[in-house]
Image: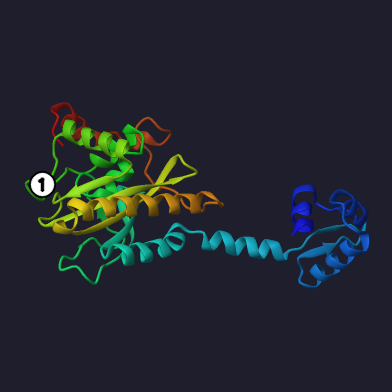
Amino acid sequence: MRIILHLGDNGPDLSLAQISSELALNRSTVHRLLAAMQKFHLIEQNALNEKYRLGLKFHELAARTVHTRSLQYEARPYLVELARRSNESVSLAVPGAGGVICLDRIDSPNSILTVRTLIGERLPAHATAPAKAILAWLPHTEAYAVTFRYPPRRYTPLTVLRLRDFKNVLDLTRRRGYATEHEELEKGLSGLAAPILYKGGRVIAALGMAGPTLRFIGPDLEKKIVLIKDFAARLSKTLSLGPANFGTVMEPLAGSSLGERLKPSWKGPIARIKSGVF
């Protein structure tokens, strides 16, 4: 492993003498190990200068690694374990074109209430915990572009519709480190969510949990808050360790290089912002 890493960091190719000297390893030992790795195409010898370099097998393995490091692939084990630990339905949401999208979901077999959001469906930005968790960590312009893209709908008497109240919700969400949803989308249904942050900064997703309101109060709620924050932090750490082939697919905002085409869609939202009502 030291030889492989040394070649990767100091290549493109090195001689046998260079490798043994720079790593302080016996020359015959290095030669034996290089010969063994050549059999598996991990190491190649340049026919022109007889120096050693990494083999094409690493290119093949790297391509497979990038392919499997999709957000959904990486997050799935965490969703499965979180659903088992919490006995609630859990979901993964991402900022997408036109709003916040449900990327994956696992339903709890122990719930009499079924979360109706389908994979690939847009989440109401103002009424769901995963959407709030994402919006709270987005720049304000992006957050409001998502929120105001479609006229917010009142789902229950507890749905937040005033801009001032919603801004307070996002501020509180960021301070706490998690978002809540209390019968804002459906009566009797509550939930929690925490952001997935790439390398500690950019929000790329949210991990959500939802179920009957009676299971989201008191000590049960406190336990679920600890769970959702812990799993979101662990998933954030896992994703930040390697290359990312995921990201938001937000449409350009007004003021960006392609933002001119969005100007007509902002006439309605701007009017609602000024009035203080979505």
Amino acid at pointer 1: Arg
Q: Residue at 76% across / 63% down in the picture? A: 55
State the image coordinates of residue 127 (x, y, percent, origin top left).
Answer: 19, 47
The residue at which mark 1 appears reads as 154
- Where residue 249 appears, x then y in whole percent? 40, 48
Looking at the image, can residue 227 be seen? Answer: yes
Q: Is residue 116 above or below residue 140?
A: below
The scheme the figure's colours follow is rainbow
Determine the residue positioned at 42% across, 65% down. Answer: 77
Please tell me which residue is depicted at 30% across the width and 60% down the height of the picture: 90
x, y percent for residue 151: 17, 43
- Snapshot quadrant of residue 178: top left
- Name the foreground residue: 192 vs 35: 192
Q: Which quadrant holds the C terminus?
A: top left
Quadrant of residue 167 in the image? top left
* Relative height, residue 124 to residue 274 (above, below): below
- In the depicted structure, whether residue 252 falls above or below residue 246: above
Q: Residues within 10 Å of mark 1 (few under 14, many from 20)?
A: some
State the SS at label 1.
Answer: loop
Q: Give 267 or 93, whichever is nearer the viewer.
A: 93
**Residue 239, horizontal then vertical, whole percent:** 49, 52
| Residue 156 placement, left or right of 265 | left
Q: Quadrant of the N terminus?
A: bottom right
- Please state which of residues 75 and 138 is positioned toward the viewer in this rendering: 75
